[in-house]
Image (tube, helix red, strand yellow):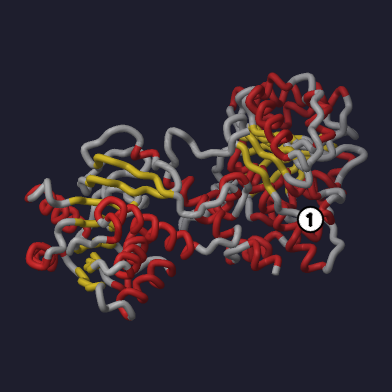
Amino acid sequence: MKWSTNPEGITSAEMAILDNNSEWLGIPKSHLMECAGYAVALELQKCFFPENATNGKKVAIFCGTGNNGGDGFVLARHLSSWGIEVVVVLVGQPANIRTNEARLNWDIISQSLTSLIKIEIIRDSTELGKIGMMLEEEGYRDIIVDGLLGTGIEGKIREPISTAIDLINAVKEKDPDKVSIVSIDIPSGVHPDRGDVLDKAVKADLVITFHALKKGLVGNSAYWKEIIVKPIGIPREAFLYVGKGDFLPTVKRRKVDAHKGEFGRILIIGGSKNYSGAPAYSSLTSLQFGIDLVITFTPEIVGNVIRSYSPNLIVRTHPGAWLNLDALKEINPLMEWANTILIGPGMGVKKETEILLVELLKKLRDENKSLVLDADALKLVKNHLNMLNGQKVIVTPHAGELKIMTGLELPPYKKTEERSTLVKDIAKKYNITFLVKGVHDIISDGIRIKINRTGCPEMSIGGTGDVLAGLCACFLATGNDTFSSACSAAFFNGFLGEYTKKQKNGRFTAMDMIINIPLAFQELISSQSALKLKL
């Protein structure tokens, strides 16, 4: 299997995931910025300063206050180290530089490197007139680098960036044969994902973009003539393994005016005469995660046992020891109420329960609801897999359950590529998302594939799978797609296990994990690198 980026281009969201995953792997974002700026410097040297001959040329670098500008600051430093005179035009206030990485490189060039680097700060658009005159009079107009806006562009461009773009284009139009415009990553003003220009954009002769071709740069445009893709040290592991970069976009925030029910409504269907803990664990996981409303539907025989876990649990019951078709009438309005349904924890494998499951799947297909199938439901659905085809569903088998479901046996866990290929093929066949649990979890929707490496051997105890199923439902209920939800659930579940192991000095239970969800969540959000946690 080839682990590669999309040949149709990478989106800005996907690029942000790779940046954050690289940081999670221990590569500081400042390292990536350093590589980006140096990559541009090398390309400029190749194109304009062959054999280190500057030929008296100077370079003007227009920088914004984001990471695109930070790349420009690094570029200025490297060009100056080769004896090339540079003027850095910061379009915006130094106090507004948005990231620590860009701030670090601004401080270096503005405070320490004053020999060959000249600094001009543009606080409003009226000051750009003098910059145009300076470019002409002091010879900085032959090579102009655009580092104004990166991949975060959306809507009308504000001042003074707007006037700066006009200035760059005007200098080029005045002497098109002599002036060369080079854009860092993407021409400022071009939408990185669509390639359109909503307001205005720099017209670049050369675009030096990083890691992979941006989706908005696929095809031809009047806003660039040539594109060069340069690596900046993002490792294969950043897109192969689930990381914090995958997790962060799935973490939804409550609106100021939110009301009860907007942050998820989950229905959990499970439990039986023999099992009360499994649906309770999934339900408690959902509540600790912060889902607004969770209803657990279970046989009456275990209803009070589940209620005893917490007064926060809402438990609805049906007479008997096992769920059967007679419960459908009671379940129907609950499924209409919920935006995500989890079926399976502890529900048993009775034939009467299988008949109920089939009817539930029929209704869920009609209503297009998000669904998680776990535990016993995976065994009951083995003869009905085609009913899942194309549904918004995550199935969460371990290797043994996968064999029961599909008849296929996974290779040993160390044969990662072979296991991953098989899981992807199965997911593609049924057009649903598989989260195959193991030493390393494998997640695929038949198109994308990720491997999760978080977790610890101490998690091989009863109940941790129910926690994982609950987390899958949580990420679905808060508005994420099935693949992203499965990735984040596997990642956070493993992290939660690692965190709980640390807190409990080794052995722990699924309930210990559930109790630790809020603290582990905050630890994960505030942590930059997995390496720091392990150290």
Q: Quadrant of residue 364?
A: top right
Q: Identify the element where label 1 is drawn.
A: loop
Q: In the rendered image of this protein, does residue 159 appear above or below residue 478? A: below
Residue appearing at x 82%, y 53% in the figure:
459
Residue appearing at x 20%, y 71% in the figure:
120
Q: In the rendered image of this protein, does residue 358 appear above or below residue 28? A: above
Where residue 236 sits in the image (x, y, percent)?
57, 47
Residue ranking furthest to the bottom: 111
Q: Amino acid at mark 1?
A: Cys
Where residue 210 sits in the image (x, y, percent)?
41, 49
Which of the image's four quarters has the C terminus?
bottom right
User: In the figure, is residue 276 to the left or right of 338?
Assistant: right
Label 1 sits on residue: 456
Which of the image's four quarters has the N terminus?
top right
For residue 131, say whether it is visible: yes
User: In the figure, is residue 334 to the left or right of 124?
Assistant: right
Residue appearing at x 39%, y 45% in the figure:
229
Where residue 169 sits in the image (x, y, percent)?
15, 50
Q: In the rendered image of this protein, does residue 112 appear above or below residue 143? A: below
Residue ranking furthest to the right: 274
Where residue 191 sits in the image (x, y, percent)?
32, 44
Residue appearing at x 66%, y 31% in the figure:
424
Closer to the camera in the image, 447 or 504: 447
